[in-house]
Image (cartoon, rainbow, N blue to C red):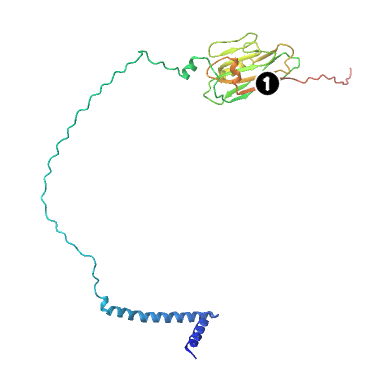
Amino acid sequence: MSLDELINRVRYRLDGYFHSEKRSVKFLARFLAFTLFAAVISTIAPTLADELADDPSMMQPVASDETTTTVTISPTETSTASPTPDPTFSPEPEISRPAITNSSAEPLPEGESSESATANGPGVALEIQPRYILKIPATGGIDPRATTYFLPLIYAANEDPEVEFTMACISAPAVRFDLGAKGVANNSIEGEELITGDQSGQLIISAKTNRVINLINSVGGLFLSSNSGGLAGRSLTFRFVAVTKPVADPAICSAAQSGAITTVRALGLDLSTVKGGGKLK
């Protein structure tokens, strides 16, 4: 039997033990191999360490390649610095400038601010109109033959608390409005409450918002009368404009962003005859 064949047989036998199907044989073979390897290492390592310790070449010190250089510093004489002369400044040349004189002794005119112009001028509609909360009936029922009608109480308020003044425009074709005291024209063109168009079909009221509503609802409410025929089928248009101050200008009514319409409708009245029996005593 040759050496190669012997080695192959031993390797095959060991491989069979290492990968045996029996767990006990496999673990035992691996344990014996690990023990043998540890025994070889523990035997060879001390011997190698002793040989290295006995080698005289390992005990010689290694010379450093760096060289130490000693530098001797000799004392030197301290030199005395001579004082530096102060710099000499030459005076700055004087520059003559011509005096500037105003062409006019009067002060320049100052433009009038927009707030001042608004306070002194007539009231105008606000550029940004607030939204009004309106509670106005959409319809009102009357007798088909009626020519007069009291408008129910209304309510209006704006959502912006900074808006103080309101101009209310109320209009209707072929209708005459009567505000406040009935039978007289309660118009006012001066003061904090402006009223124009009373006893006409185009009524304008301008004051603080709450005051405008109170005037409309005063003395039983706004009274309507027809110029011709009955009031049934007529419509009233309400428009509310926020203004900078009380003003009664029909041209400003078109700036309104909040409004309502109330239609006066005829109530259905039917006449019928009911037959019944009775006993006479």
Write down the quadrant of residue 104 in the picture. Answer: top left
Q: Is residue 2 above or below residue 52?
A: below
Relative depth, front residue between 109 and 206:
109
| Residue 61 in the image, given as x and y percentages of width and height | 24, 72
Q: Is residue 165 above or below residue 88?
A: above
Judge whether residue 216 can be spotted in this image. Answer: yes
Number of marks in picture: 1
| Residue 117 in the image, given as x and y percentages of width and height | 48, 16
Is 229 on the left-hand or right-hand side of 36? right
Relative depth, front residue between 90 and 45:
90
The quarter of the image holding the C terminus is top right
> Which secondary structure lies at badge 1?
strand
Few, some or many residues within 10 Å of mark 1 (<14, 14–19, 20+): some
Is 110 on the left-hand or right-hand side of 98? right
Is 103 on the left-hand or right-hand side of 250? left
Write down the quadrant of residue 237 in the picture. Answer: top right
The residue drawn where x is 65% and y is 22% is 260
| Residue 172 in the image, given as x and y percentages of width and height | 67, 16
Is 272 on the left-hand or right-hand side of 102? right
| Residue 50 in the image, given as x and y percentages of width and height | 30, 80
Write down the quadrant of residue 221 in the picture. Answer: top right
Say which residue label 1 marks: 262
The residue type indicated by label 1 comes to Thr
Q: In this view, which residue lies farthest toward the top?
A: 184
Judge whether residue 152 can be spotted in this image. Answer: no
